[in-house]
Image (cartoon, grey):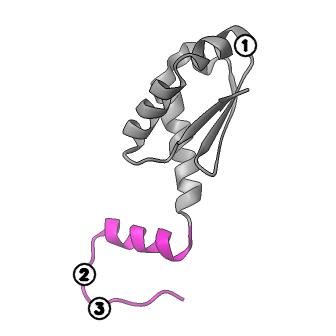
Amino acid sequence: MAKRHNDNQSIQDILKEFVQTNNLQSGLDKVDVRDAWTKLMGNGVNNYTTAIELKNETLYVKLSSSVLREELSYGTEKIIAMLNESLGKELVKKLVLR
């Protein structure tokens, strides 16, 4: 059960504490990576994206177009840098396009 605090705290601090005590950060990171991918890549790539999954600092993206997969494979380092910059932390170390 959570501790009760007598002093006033901001909602942000309370939510951070809740996420830490319940080990929810990894799940939130997965959702944040999906949102960052859709925001950064735009409609053209998102139409061909069928699955996005983050496992152990590796982002797996399943694409339905082999031509698009080949084109994106040339810029994986740039995509990783853009995703990490958008997320504000170093979550993605490797990008696997399927």
Q: Residue furthest top?
A: 67
**Residue 7, horizontal then vertical, whole percent:** 25, 87
Between disc 1 and disc 3, the foreground one is 1
**Residue at the image point whose x is 53% and y is 51% from the top:** 29
Bounds of the magenta segment: 1-23
Element at badge 2? Answer: loop
Relative height, residue 33 to residue 45 (above, below) = below
Residue ID for mark 1: 65
Relative height, residue 26 to residue 38 (above, below) = below
Relative height, residue 40 to residue 3 (above, below) = above
> Which badge, 2 or 1, comes first in the chain's sequence?
2
> Which badge, 1 or 3, comes first in the chain's sequence?
3
Question: How far is the residue under mark 1 from the one under mark 3?
Answer: 56 Å
Element at badge 1? Answer: loop
Determine contact: label 1, label 3, CB under 8 Å.
no
Determine contact: label 2, label 3, CB under 8 Å.
no
The circle drawn on residue 8 is 2
**Residue 19, horizontal then vertical, whole percent:** 49, 68
The residue type indicated by label 2 comes to Asn
The residue type indicated by label 1 comes to Ser
Q: Is residue 50 left or right of residue 42?
A: right
Count of numbered badges drawn on the protein: 3
Question: How far is the residue under mark 2 from the one under mark 3?
Answer: 7 Å
Q: Is residue 90 left or right of residue 93?
A: left
Residue ID for mark 3: 6
For the residue pair 30 and 75, the one nearer the viewer reads as 75
The residue type indicated by label 3 comes to Asn
Residue 85 falls within the magenta-colored stretch: no
